[in-house]
Image: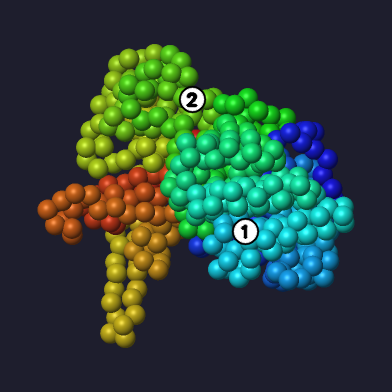
Amino acid sequence: MTATSELDDSFHVFDTTLRDGAQREGINLTVADKLAIARHLDDFGVGFIEGGWPGANPRDTEFFARARQEVDFRHAQLVAFGSTRRAGATAAEDHQVKALLDSGAEVITLVAKSHDRHVELALRTTLDENLAMVADTVSHLKAQGRRVFVDCEHFFDGYRANPEYAKSVVRTASEAGADVVILCDTNGGMLPAQVQAVVATVLADTGARLGIHAQDDTGCAVANTLAAVDAGATHVQCTANGYGERVGNANLFPVVAALELKYGKRVLPEGRLREMTRISHAVAEVVNLTPSTHQPYVGVSAFAHKAGLHASAIKVDPDLYQHIDPELVGNTMRMLVSDMAGRASIELKGKELGIDLGGDRELVGRVVERVKERELAGYSYEAADASFELLLRAEAEGRPLKYFEVESWRAITEDRPDGSHANEATVKLWAKGERIVATAEGNGPVNALDRSLRVALEKIYPELAKLDLVDYKVRILEGVHGTQSTTRVLISTSDGTGEWATVGVGENVIAASWQALEDAYTYGLLRAGVTPAE
């Protein structure tokens, strides 16, 4: 279905995740994946979604056929990608050009050679024939009622080698009817000042409407994209989360955020910028890659503050250490608690967790000292909010939060003569006045402990049936010898609606894991609203 955008045509946000992003190592999109990502990108509000190369492979051909029927585009137009006709043929008889028309896409992007050496060595044709290929293909598609964009591949390298020929490709495409001619930094080797100078010159010399497509090989793709906009480009090509071949493409999210929040350009429909963090993470889930925690604007650490000096300033005014309000992009500010924490960090973190410290300077001071003492012993609370909240509540209430009292636990690993292994754990504890002994087997000693604790408690606390251990990390801290070093364990647990992390530290991995498990179950019961034992 054709989208109807509330934005005008003066500036384009063009997404190439489904083609360029799919070229990233480790990404292999099914048709269903591509349809899901297309829905997310349309929901975000990009103007154009490049779906792939119909006719080049069955997957992309199927995607276009299904997208017409299954995706109700509200904001974006679906774009088919292909190349100019073959040398020595005509666009009207070229099978690849026909496949672009058969895709049903109303917008078509053509890749054209703009580097003279690529024309002669890759296409094995003449420079004049290459120009004829561009003109014939563009004019043929325009005559069929399609809107046409032209990607000038390797443009910046071609411009460096033969600027007049590179500009002649731009001019030819524009005069043949191309709506936009995109200058591509295909090898990703350009820097912002270079991009700005070239785009400004090409714009002045050709009069064409220009776009920018930047790869990130120098780490400058976002900066290069914005430099091109500064020089007059009105079409930006990007991928979600910067996915792409080699080190990736210009990242859609910081580009859009910069355009909207720094340049004051309205490039998304009203209210869609607040969906940015959600969309970024949703796309990451579809491609099965962990979202980058330190990605600008949308990363979980993008507005995380650790230093005590920062926290004291943020307590007065968050803008003192934040370049934007994180809610504008659907993110949140986070306070990290560590041995660098001061009073302000603890007060802000307490407020974030819904615990009113009431300006109790003595209490806050005790918590600060307790955190520093524990972190010196190897604990890490910046990655374990649940364990910190339990510590904070224990100090505020004068006693630990207890749902059960552990008498003892043990874990046994047995090597058998046939080469198999057995892991068994026994837990003895008291809960609601009842002494419970539970034994369970597992696929490892920690798993056996987890199961025995669950067996012991689930009859008394059925809320624990919802809990799942979703992540488990072990780190050996500094010591004289590896096997004698302190071990830190981080456990992530979910109840189906939320996720929390707990930390344990001990002389061995089993003891550290037990501490983290105890905190995980205790916090899970707290989240479930269960009243602690007397």
Percent x, y of residue 51: 70, 57
Query: Looking at the rendering, in which quadrant would you find the C terminus?
Result: top left
Tell me the kind of residue under disc 2.
His
Residue 145 in sight in this render = yes
Q: Residue 418 occupies which quadrant of the picture?
A: bottom left
Question: Residue pushed farthest left?
Answer: 480
Q: Is 424 above or below relative to 511?
A: below
**Image point (42%, 23%), residue name:** 321
**Image point (83%, 66%), residue name:** 92
Tell me the kind of residue under disc 1.
Lys
**Foreground of the two, 521 or 184:** 184
Percent x, y of residue 408: 29, 53
Q: Secondary structure at mark 1?
A: strand
**Image point (36%, 30%), residue name:** 306
In the rendered structure, the answer to whether residue 325 lies left or right of residue 66 reads: left
* Residue 113, numbered label: 1
Q: Which residue is mark 2?
A: 323
**Sequence order check, earlier mark of 2 and 1:** 1
Q: Is 529 above or below relative to 349?
A: below
Q: Is 514 above or below relative to 52?
A: above
**Image point (36%, 54%), residue name:** 473
**Foreground of the two, 276 or 385:** 276
In the rendered structure, the answer to whether residue 387 lies left or right of residue 499 reads: left
Colour pattern of the rendering: rainbow
Percent x, y of residue 105: 80, 56
**Foreground of the two, 404 or 148:** 148
Q: Secondary structure at mark 2?
A: loop
**Foreground of the two, 36 or 230:** 230
Q: Residue 65 occupies which quadrant of the picture?
A: bottom right
